[in-house]
Image (cartoon, rainbow, N blue to C red):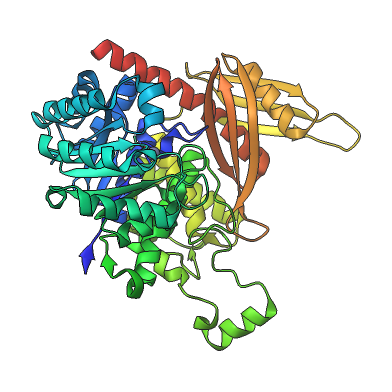
């Protein structure tokens, strides 16, 4: 069977989603999980965008060994230099360089003639080839480009040394038939096309990103690009978990294979959702909460008699355990550590001890500890371990009555190590907590969005709060989990502020070390 390379751009195109703001520790966590998921290539960021982005790409490139790590660059020397700075530590440095080729982009954005665009593309590839053994070249807005011009520039890009040619539908305008036809046209009209791999990159503005990706495969694409949970600019990119499961389930139709480890899908999807703060819609294919829920009596009856009546894929295929009760009140430290290790967490002894303590506290209050609960405890501990905490919640209390205005009291460990306590009221309990924390925090906070949901099922499930706020004018997302949603809300608020402080500290460190 033909092998399709999977190129993940969650950390670059996905991170461009409105409101998503990952710090380096979080990007590294996602990168390690993408490696376990088995992606062939991961785009770790856009090194020229900022010193922080460059540093994150460098750290990922020096950590990841089983996937090829790449970074994006515009067709200018300074971008390629920044990418080399970040990627030269990689096992096999790979560059992704792009320029727009559609009349709309060339005229209005680049203000270059088609001939100038060809010249710039060729120059940038030749320049990059002095450093990078593998250069992927992308024709931004390829789908809206003139096919004859596109074939010409692709031929020149291959001559200049590109080994992968990516043909994006940048604005999500194509239909599957049309997008597939573009690949066929390139195969038939670019004389040196056999020297390279063709790659698809689809956006989901009309909801056709995955269908377009599959059409590209049918018409000769050897690599497909996308993101976990379909994250990305505007309506997002092709969801890689959907592409992977479609290729597996319908191998009779596509007759291709990938290196993906499908039973890592659930974990990868949850990690990305938690760290980006982007919730997954309940009815989302493959990873939505309801993706395997049979609700109607007729369906339930059918599935009980014979699962394949209504189930074309099983939860086990994507790593969703049907019975995910993992540990209980009487589980010991050894079982806990083993489980953490098998879930892929690498925590030092102190962090493991702290996580175990939190697990025991939760087990006292909650009958069943699920893998989702464990995952939440361990992730929070891992991020703390990597220095993410600056303000730490010691305690929070709310006095609430239907007749009174709620009053909150909070104790917080602040960055200088002292404990500060304050109290304030608000129109509701959550507002009272936020008002109180605002009095303790040194900076201007403005809450933009806030939501709570439960992690797992049951009345004693953990609550998770996600908050979007601006801190001193910059936007951040924070998350917090606890058995009580008010405590989770206070943690989410402080987490967002801590992320902002961590980012400023990183910027300072990078500027002083340059
Ligand atoms: O959508 C797009 O065209 C891109 C390119 C930079 C590859 O993301
Ligand atoms: Zn894109």
Q: In this view, does 51 lie above or below 186?
A: above
Q: Where is residue 397 in the image (x, y as percent from the top left)?
A: 70, 33
Left or right: where 180 falls relative to 411: left
As drawn, the residue found furthest toward the front would be: 148
Depth check, front residue: 327 or 157: 157
Could you say which quadrant of the image residue 49 lies in?
top left
As drawn, the residue found furthest toward the right would be: 403
As drawn, the residue found furthest toward the left would be: 130
Q: Position of residue 447 (x, y in %)?
A: 64, 26
Q: In this view, does 440 lie above or below 89?
A: above
Depth check, front residue: 474 or 415: 474
Could you say which quadrant of the image residue 340 lies in?
bottom left
Q: Position of residue 149 (x, y in %)?
A: 27, 37
Depth check, front residue: 179 or 335: 179
Residue at 56 percent across and 62 percent down: it is 368
Residue at 35 percent across and 72 percent down: it is 253
Left or right: where 5 falls relative to 143: left
Q: Position of residue 461 (x, y in %)?
A: 62, 55
Residue at 20 percent across and 44 percent down: it is 164
Q: Is residue 227 visible?
A: yes
Depth check, front residue: 292 or 360: 292
Could you say which quadrant of the image residue 511 lies in?
top left
Residue at 81 percent across and 36 percent down: it is 400
Q: Is residue 375 above or below residue 87?
A: below
As drawn, the residue found furthest toward the top would be: 512
Q: Which corner quadrant holds the N terminus?
A: bottom left
| Ligand 2 falls in quadrant | top left
Q: Can residue 337 be seen in this view?
A: no
């Amino acid at each position: 069977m033909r092998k399709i390379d999977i190129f993940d751009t969650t950390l670059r195109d996905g991170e461009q989603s409105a409101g998503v703001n990952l710090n380096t520790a979080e990007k590294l966590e996602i990168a390690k999980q993408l490696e376990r998921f088995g992606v062939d290539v991961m785009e770790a960021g856009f090194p020229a965008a900022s010193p922080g982005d460059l540093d994150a790409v460098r750290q990922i490139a020096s950590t990841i060994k089983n996937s090829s790590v790449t970074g994006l660059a515009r067709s200018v020397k300074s971008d390629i230099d920044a990418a080399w700075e970040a990627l030269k530590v990689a096992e096999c440095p790979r560059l992704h360089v792009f320029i727009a080729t559609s009349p709309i982009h060339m005229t209005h954005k680049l203000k270059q003639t088609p001939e100038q665009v060809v010249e710039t593309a060729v120059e940038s590839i030749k320049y990059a080839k002095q450093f990078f053994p593998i250069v992927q070249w992308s024709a931004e807005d390829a789908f809206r480009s003139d096919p004859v011009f596109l074939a010409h520039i692709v031929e020149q890009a291959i001559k200049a040394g590109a080994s992968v040619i990516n043909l994006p539908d940048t604005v999500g305008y194509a239909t599957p038939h049309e997008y597939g036809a573009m690949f066929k046209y390139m195969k038939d009209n670019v004389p040196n096309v056999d020297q390279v791999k063709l790659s698809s990159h689809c956006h989901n503005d009309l909801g056709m990103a995955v269908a377009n990706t599959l059409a590209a495969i049918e018409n000769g694409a050897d690599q497909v690009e996308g993101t976990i949970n379909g994250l990305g600019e505007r309506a997002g990119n092709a969801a890689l978990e959907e592409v992977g499961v479609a290729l597996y389930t319908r191998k009779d139709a596509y007759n291709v294979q990938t290196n993906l480890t499908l039973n890592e899908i659930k974990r990868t999807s949850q990690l990305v959702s938690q760290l980006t703060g982007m919730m997954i819609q309940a009815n989302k294919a493959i990873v939505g909460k309801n993706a395997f829920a049979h609700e109607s009596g007729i369906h339930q009856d059918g599935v009980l008699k014979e699962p394949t009546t209504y189930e074309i894929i099983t939860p086990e295929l994507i790593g969703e355990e049907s019975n995910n009760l993992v540990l209980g009140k009487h589980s010991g430290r050894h079982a806990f550590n083993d489980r953490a290790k098998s879930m892929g967490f690498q925590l030092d002894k102190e962090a493991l001890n702290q996580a175990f303590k939190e697990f025991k506290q939760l087990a006292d209050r909650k009958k069943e500890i699920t893998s989702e609960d464990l995952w939440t405890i361990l992730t929070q501990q891992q991020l703390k371990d990597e220095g993410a905490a600056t303000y730490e919640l010691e305690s929070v209390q709310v006095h609430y009555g239907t007749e009174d205005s709620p009053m909150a009291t909070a104790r917080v460990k602040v960055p200088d190590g002292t404990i500060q306590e304050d109290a304030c009221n608000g129109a509701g309990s959550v507002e009272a907590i936020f008002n109180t924390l605002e009095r303790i925090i040194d900076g201007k906070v403005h809450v933009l969005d806030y939501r709570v949901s439960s992690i797992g099922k049951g009345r004693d499930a953990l609550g998770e709060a996600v908050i979007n706020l601006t801190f001193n004018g910059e936007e951040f997302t924070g998350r917090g989990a606890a058995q009580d949603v008010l405590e989770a809300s206070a943690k989410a608020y402080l987490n967002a502020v801590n992320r902002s402080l961590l980012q400023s500290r990183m910027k300072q460190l990078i500027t002083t070390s340059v």
